[in-house]
Image (cartoon, rainbow, N blue to C red):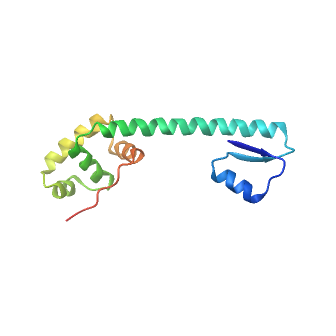
Amino acid sequence: MIIMTGHGDVPLAVRAMKAGAVDFLEKPFDGEFMLDTVRRALALSAQTRDQAALAQLAASRVAALTPREKEVLGHLVAGHSNKIIAYELAISPRTVEIHRGHLMEKMQARSLSSVIQMALVAGVEPSARRR
């Protein structure tokens, strides 16, 4: 959204920017400046669409996980080691490794950092230690 006005004031500009305006132009303005503003708005729109698509993809991958895999993921996001996760979930460290491998496969991730990044984009909350 680009706001153009002949009678702008600071409170109006602030409200427009808070509502998501890319720019607030007061007449008269240069045509080249307007084109630059439109280009910036289009680039921002494309970036927002890309981020929304990534968030939707990450959310769909997290949704494909079993409840236990989601628990393990929450602990991974919190930075817990396999041993801590095993203790918290009352399972063996080997079982944690298996769940971790399954969730990495389902999320199509090659590294722990990419799993965590996807989880954060999808809105996964870190699990707190209970014991």
Residue shown at the point (73%, 55%) measured from the top left? 12
Residue 110 makes an appearance in the image: no
User: Residue sitting at 67 percent across and 51 percent down?
Assistant: 17
The residue sitting at 34% across, 43% down in the picture is 115
Question: In the rendered image of this protein, does residue 88 appear above or below residue 28?
Answer: below
Q: Residue 35 or 20: which is nearer the viewer?
A: 20
Q: Check the picture and name the quadrant holding the C terminus.
A: bottom left
Relative image position of residue 14 (x, y in whole percent): 69, 56
Q: Position of residue 93 (x, y in %)?
A: 15, 50
- Examine the rendered structure and indicate whether residue 129 appears above or below residue 106: below
Q: 36 or 112: which is nearer to us? A: 36
* Residue 71 spot, x, y in % from top left: 24, 49
Residue that lies at the very extreme toward the right in this rendered image: 28
Q: Which quadrant, please, contains the N terminus?
A: top right
* Left or right, residue 109 beside residue 30: left
Give the quadrant of residue 43. top right
Name the quadrant containing residue 28.
top right
Q: Horizontal placement of 131 versus 107: left or right? A: left
Q: Is residue 42 visible?
A: yes
Figure label count: 0
Tell me residue 124's x, y (percent).
35, 49
Q: Quadrant of residue 9?
A: bottom right
Q: Nearer the viewer, residue 21 or 7?
A: 7
At 27% across and 56% down in the image, what residue appears?
80
**Left or right: 45 in relation to 110:** right
